[in-house]
Image (tube, coloured by chain):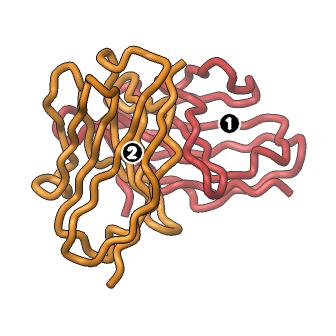
Chain colours: A orange, B red
């Protein structure tokens, strides 16, 4: 059964970039779609974008278009989410998950806390 | 403001049943049978509880059930247990351009 393990917490200054990784094990990475969801402190879930590693192209929620890049490395079964021009409002826990079918996300990674602060 | 509307909180006593609603539009919930529900305990990742509006993944208790009528989906939890106390989020496919939208979440308190 596939499991997702994410990279550790990050603290970044405003205006910088962060790259979060999500490594899959126990399954066939090439057949999955990977999605990214974030959750600001005390807030709800927000879909950011996703990628099908075997296709290579990603799609993004409109509000993240141009500032977020989602990629995947099939050789290491790892997906990445990079966000540029960080601001304090980007402080959140970032989750990756397997997208089974149009919003059916299972399982999820453990989450990565990104704190944006000077 | 979230795209899907959920009550901020619901409560129920041990052993009782509760229902959480999730109201969308004809562009999301009403147009697709692709509604999912997630349970999230504090400090944990969300867990899939229902997919395709009413399907239960293996390992999820049959006390959890989902339904949909028009633009509103619902999650019902019967025989409430203490461990059901958590936040619950609905999610719906919303077409190729938007992809998916989430509800704002509902905090379930078990009395």
Vertical side of B38 occupied by A56: above or below: above
In the image, what residue occupies the spot 20% across and 55% down? Answer: A64
Label 1 SS: strand
Which residue is painted at 39% across and 45% down in the image? B24
Task: Decide: few, some or many residues near mark 2? Use Cα within 10 Å; few <14, some 14-19, many ≥20.
Answer: many
Dot 1: chain letter: B
User: Residue, x 22% and y 48% (percent of image)?
Assistant: A61
Q: Quick one: quadrant of the N terminus of chain A?
A: top right
Q: Quadrant of the C terminus of chain A?
A: bottom left
Q: CA distance from mark 2 to mark 1?
A: 18 Å
The answer to whether residue A58 of the structure is visible from this angle is yes
Is B12 drawn above or below residue B71 in the view shown? below
Give the quadrant of residue B48: top right
Q: What's the residue at 55%, 23% (across, down)?
A: B54
Q: Position of residue A94 (x, y in %)?
A: 41, 53
Q: Both on one chain, marks 2 and 1?
A: yes
Q: Chain of mark 2?
A: B
Q: Which residue is mark 1?
A: B76
């Amino acid at each position: 059964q596939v499991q997702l393990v994410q990279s550790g917490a990050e603290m970044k200054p405003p205006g910088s970039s962060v790259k979060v990784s999500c490594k899959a094990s126990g399954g066939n990475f090439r057949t999955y779609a990977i999605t990214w969801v974030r959750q600001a402190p005390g807030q709800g879930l927000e879909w950011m974008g996703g990628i099908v590693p075997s296709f290579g192209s990603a799609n993004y929620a409109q509000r993240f278009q141009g500032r977020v890049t989602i990629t995947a490395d099939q050789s290491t079964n790892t997906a990445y989410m990079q966000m540029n021009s960080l601001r304090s409002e980007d402080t959140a826990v970032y989750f990756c998950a397997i997208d089974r079918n149009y919003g059916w996300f299972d399982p999820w990674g453990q989450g990565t806390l990104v704190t944006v602060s000077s | 403001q979230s795209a899907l509307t959920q009550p901020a909180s619901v409560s129920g006593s041990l052993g009782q049943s509760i229902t959480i609603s999730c109201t969308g539009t004809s562009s999301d919930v009403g147009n697709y049978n692709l509604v999912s529900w997630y349970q999230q305990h504090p400090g944990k990742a969300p867990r899939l509880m229902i997919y395709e509006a009413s399907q239960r993944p293996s390992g999820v208790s049959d006390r959890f059930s989902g339904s949909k009528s028009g633009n509103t989906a619902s999650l019902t939890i019967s025989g409430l247990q203490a461990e059901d106390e958590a936040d619950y989020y609905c999610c719906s496919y919303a077409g190729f351009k938007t992809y998916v939208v989430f509800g704002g979440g509902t905090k379930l308190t078990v009395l």
